[in-house]
Image (cartoon, rainbow, N blue to C red):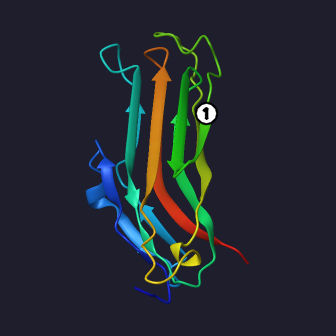
Amino acid sequence: MATDVSTWSAFAADYDPAGQAASMTRSVAEDGSSVNFTLDRLTMLLQGDQDRPFAAALGMAGQLAVSLPEELDLIGFLLVVSGHVERTPGTQAVVSCAIGHGARGVEWPLESIAGAPSGDSREVSISDADFRLECFTSDFNPAMVGEPPFPPLPPFPITMTMQARRRAIDESIGLTITDFRVIIVRSA
């Protein structure tokens, strides 16, 4: 089926322990060049006493498909994952994302090996920052090879993961992935 603009499918979740897929908000650029998914619960928080977790991991994975105009000279897809981290010095974390065969990650290493021992009267510093990860996968438009009717472009996998660890009772870390966007990259 030939289209004038790219048409995006819904995100098909394969792994979604947070139940995020059901409440994602999707918005597609008017020209079909990108799709954005806003998330409201892909969040991980480690804090509290010795009976609370000191380490955790959370992720989401699925597939996304797009129908392309036959004349679109596709180079690939760019995945942009945005979020926020808030942490004390005795924590560490990593967030990673992948689209197709491209993957990227960002790390927050320990800032202090001592951490904040329980009962310490000193003020614990909390740092917070937004993060943005970008990763790319190359691809081509099926209409560029062969004769009509052209097969559809197969769906591509998308994964996002978070893992974190705190070293002491008084340490805390919170990670949130707020949204992800997939952008069509085409030749000029």
Quarter of the image where one finds residue 109: top right
Considering only vertical position in the picture, is 179 above or below 131?
below
Q: Residues within 10 Å of mark 1 (few under 14, many from 20)?
A: few
Q: Position of residue 158 (x, y in %)?
A: 45, 52
Residue reaching furthest to the front: 147
Question: Percent from the top left, x then y, of residue 21?
Answer: 30, 56
Picture quarter with the C terminus: bottom right
Nearest to the observer: residue 35 or residue 75: 75
In the rendered view, tell whether residue 23 sits above or below residue 162. Answer: below
- Left or right: 132 with respect to 99? right
Asked whether residue 87 appears in the rendered view, the answer is: no
Residue furthest to the right in view is 188
Where residue 112 appears, as percent x and y from the top left, is 64, 17
| Vertical position of residue 179 compared to residue 107: above or below | below
User: Residue 61, percent across and down?
Assistant: 38, 47
Q: Secondary structure at mark 1?
A: strand
Q: Quadrant of residue 128?
A: top right
Mark 1, residue position: 107
- Work out whether residue 107 or residue 159 is closer to the camera in this orientation and state it: 159
Q: Nearer the viewer, residue 125 or 58?
A: 58
Marker count (numbered): 1
Image point 47% across, 23% down: which residue? 165
Placement of the N terminus among the 4 image quadrants = bottom left
Q: Is residue 107 left or right of residue 188?
A: left
- Residue name at image x 59 percent, y 47 percent: 131
Residue placed at 65% from the left, 22% from the top? 111
The picture quadrant where one finds residue 10 is bottom left
Label 1 sits on what residue type? Glu
Specify whether residue 184 is in view. Answer: yes
- Residue drawn 58% across and 16% down? 122
